[in-house]
Structures are given as structure tokens and as C-alpha cells.
Image: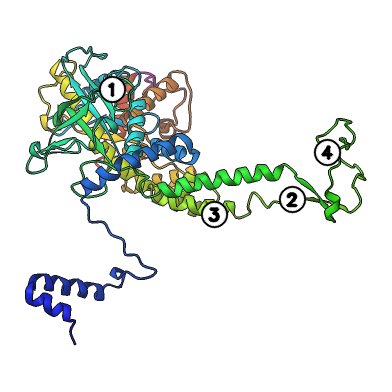
Amino acid sequence: MGNPLDSVINALAPQWGARRAGARQILSAYEAAKPSRTQKAKGSTLSGDLTAQIGGRSLREQARWLDENHDLVTGIFDRLEERVVGADGMGIEPIPLDTNGQRLRELSKAIKAEWAAWSLRPETTGEMTRPEMERLVVRSWLRDGEVLAQELRGRVPLYDHLTDVPYALECLEADYLPLHFNDPAQKIAAGIERNAWRRVKAYHVYKQHPGSLTNFAMATKRVPADSMIHLAHRKRLQQSRGISILHAVLQRLADLKDYEESERVAARIAAAMTMYIKKGEPHDYAVNSGKTDQGAGAALPPGQRAFQIAPGMVFDGLMPGEDVGTIQSNRPSALLDGFRGAMIRAAAAGTRMGYSTANRDYNGTYSAQRQELIEAQLGYDLLQGQFRDQWSRRVYRSWLDMAVIIGRIQLPPNLDRRTLYNAFYLGPVMPWIDPGREADAWEQLVAAGFADESEVARARGRNPQELKQSREDEIAENREKGLVFSSDAYHEFYGGKNGADPNGNPAGNGDSARARNRQLRQPADGQGGNRD
């Protein structure tokens, strides 16, 4: 028999009745959708933009507080800096090509030289080098959820460029972009102005940090989208503002900090031995006004007694009916280490970190450590790729445009202009746990043709061209001085002595060295090449 209420609703409002029936079917089809005594069936119906606007500021402030006060969180962000950009920042290896598809090495060298000079003072204050700036940008991006940088190109009123290439970055924390600046008439939401297709047109940012004591007016300025870099950690489609990478583990980390502090305090209390005197009868509690501190001779307030304790002493100062006891404590708890490790493991899973890295616990077999390192590296690579795509590539191309415009970099006539921006972006790579095994594996891959020498160099965080140039200079210097090492395969091939080749040419001659290299590559007697 049907529900009388449903019959009334179906007669008066058929569409409403249909929706009620559909919802009822869903609840019956999916058990998890049914609220129960143990299942609260919580849900979120807000858009990504509104969710970020409501909770973004609180999450950002909590993450900053933990970064400032919790050693574990500080270590997490330190390691994320190291694994995303590293000590040397994001490396750039230009690869421009000519119209025949050959690499223009001289142009690459010129670009790298100018890039290195600009990297010394890339931002407006002149206080940071590019690697230092990038590490702080990564930390702000992941901790606060987002970071911004205004690009200053060419002549800018009231600003003097600090480098030969007139291009600089004004790095801004997420606070500069107001979360609650909304103007539907201008299509502005959370400080970001968009068109009808949600393409960003401009950013409305504060002229000064809103937390500054001098920012009373809270005035904003409009910065076009092509002059602003917005690096955001988004979790949903059509989400304009970023969310801290700690958003899902903030409560766990805060609770863990409080729990550790409680255990530390309890351990300190337990370390201070506390004694008590137990008296048998009520009349034993009479005030002993004339008692003195035994052994000290100093008078005590009425009703108080004190005893000096020394190793090996014999105590015989109890009154009739009294007994001495100590307050026992089991702190720190024996379960502390296991509980803390479980909490850190869960926190690491929510921040793309490895447990061993977050907890600084590296116990385990080679296989287990390598498996964890590989899985953690996937998360680092994802963050590294996002930083490269949203920040490094845009900065490099904008800088290169300005360097070409002002003539700091001369483009050869045979350049294929489509390849001017070609470059490898080299970030930190996965470290080798067992260098011997890793080196043997790479050597086999190169010998079998499944990898090349450049790939091996990049896997170790080296620039292949710089590595080859360094090796060429090193070998030439060794031959000039008559030094022979196992890394110089030329001597093993020729069996030469004192750096002289079979024709008697000195090894230090650069032209003869290149001639010998060509000789090694030439086919012999119409057969295949001499290379192994």
C-alpha cells in the first residue's frame, strides 16, 4: 500500500513526486548513501570556487602556523622544496635547432650565459637569487595553496631593473589576492576577473600586504592576466583559488602536536620524583609547628616537613604510624612511537610525501626503501611538473623574449624560429640508493641501445652538454700532463703511452684529439664502424 503523502504530492505536484521517488531509489540502490547510526553520509554541494572562498583563508593560516611551530610540518615543506626545485633551482637546457634540425650549440651557450647572469637578481627586491626565490615560491604555493608573481617587462615607472635583461618578478603571497572581492557585474570572483568563458582577464590585488600595519586603505590595483603568474594548487575543476596541500591532514597534524606536547610534559613530571607520606589515623594529622628540615636545620612553616635524599642513605625519620610512598608514572607511553608513526604515515599519504622522508625513519631493506622511494618520487614528479608548466616555462620564455628584443641574444639566420623556446627543464631527480647497482643498470641500458648518455646524465641531475664539455677539458688536461686514468678509454684502445697517439701527435692538441675521435667513428675496410 502506497504512502498517503506520496499520493497527495503526486496529484498536486507530479514533478516533485518524481524527484522524491528517484531519491528513494538512489538510497535503496547505494547502501553508502543511506544515513544510519554509524554512517552520517556527509556531503558537499558547494562549487570549487565557493569552497575555496569559505575555507581557504582558515586553511592557509593554520598551515602557516604549523610551518612556524611544528617541527614535523617544517620538515615536510623543507623536503618538498628539496624535491621539487632543489638547491640549484629548476635547471634550463636550451635546445634551439637550425632549419636542418641540427642543434645550435653556440646559441645555446649564449642563452645559458645570459640566463645565469639574470638568475643572480631575478626579482624586484634584489635580495634573492633565482634558486632561493624558486624555493620560497614552492613553499608558499604548497603551504598557502597559491602564490603570485607580477612580471615587469621593459621600462616600468618608478622601478630600475637590476639586470641587463629588463625583466623581473614581483613575488606576492596569496594574501595579496583578496578571497572575498566579488563583483558579479564585472565578472570578478575571489579577486579574479574572467570573461564569459571563464578565461582569466585580470587579477585585482592589494597594493600592500593586508597584514601590514601600514595598509589601512586596502586599495587594490588591476593587473592584466598576461602580466601575472598565478601558481595554484587546485583540487577541483573550475576552482579559481588554490588550497593548501595540508588541507586534509591539518587536524591530524595539530592533534599530533598537542599529543606530543602532552607526552613531553608528562615525561618531565615523571622525571621529577614525587614522594608522599601516608599517615594511619586522623589524629596523626596534627600540626607539628616545631618541626625542622632534618639535616638542614632551617625552620619550615607549620605542618610541613622536608627530607634530604642522597644515594645509599638510611632514612629513619618517620613518625609513628607513617609510611613513605612514591607516585609512579608510565610516561612516556610505550605506545607513543607506534601511534606517532601511524599518524605520520597517514599525514604523508595526504601530502604526496614518503613516510620515511616525513618521519626520518629509514629502517628497512633495499627493496622496501626503493619501492617507497619510487612511489614517493611519482608525487614529487607531479608537483615538479606542475611547477615547471605553470612557472618555469613561462618565466623562461618571457625572459628570452626580452633578451632577444633588446639584442642581448643574437639569433642566427638559420634558426628555426619554432624551436627558439625548446628546452629541457631539469629538476631534482630520484637519488640512487645503491649507486653500484644503479650504475650497472644504466650501463647495460646504454650498451643495449635502450637509453643514451644524455638520459643517464639527466638521471643524475647533470646537464649533458656541460658534462661533456667538462669531460673534454679534463681529459685534454690529463693528456697534457701525462696522466692516465681508467675513465680515458683512448689509452686502452690504442695502448698509447704518455698521451701520444700512433702517429706521434701530442694528445694535448685539440685538433688532433678531434681527428682521433673522427677516426674512431670511421668504418674500417668497408665494414662496420669501430664503435663497440
3D distance between C-alphas at marks 3 and 1 = 45 Å
Q: Which mark is residue 439?
A: none
Q: Which mark is residue 215?
A: 1
Amino acid type indicated by mark 2: Ile
Which sits in the foreground, 164 or 8? Answer: 8
3D distance between C-alphas at marks 1 and 2 = 56 Å
Residue at x 47%, y 18% (from the top left corner): 481
Q: Which mark is residue 339?
A: 3
Q: Are marks 3 and 4 in contact (CB under 8 Å)?
A: no
Q: Position of residue 425 (x, y in %)?
A: 28, 35
Q: Quadrant of the N terminus?
A: bottom left
Amino acid type indicated by mark 3: Phe
Which sits in the foreground, 220 or 528? Answer: 220
Question: Relative to residue 282, is residue 260 depicted above or below?
Answer: above
Helix, strand or loop status at disc 2: loop
Amino acid type indicated by mark 4: Ala
Which sits in the foreground, 347 or 273? Answer: 273
Task: Tell me if mark 4 has few (under 14), some (14-19) or many (20+) residues whose alpha carbon lies within 10 angstroms of its own.
Answer: few
Q: To which residue does mark 2 refer? A: 327
3D distance between C-alphas at marks 4 and 1 = 60 Å
Q: Quadrant of the C terminus?
A: top left
Question: Relative to residue 527, is residue 397 depicted above or below?
Answer: above
Task: Tell me if mark 2 has few (under 14), some (14-19) or many (20+) residues whose alpha carbon lies within 10 angstroms of its own.
Answer: few
Q: Main secondary structure of the magenta part?
A: loop
Q: Which residues are magenta?
A: 504-509
Helix, strand or loop status at disc 3: helix
Q: In the rendered view, does 70 fall on the left or right side of 305?
A: left
Say which of marks 3 and 4 sits in front: 4
- Residue 231 in view, yes or no: yes
Q: Are marks 2 and 3 in contact (CB under 8 Å)?
A: no
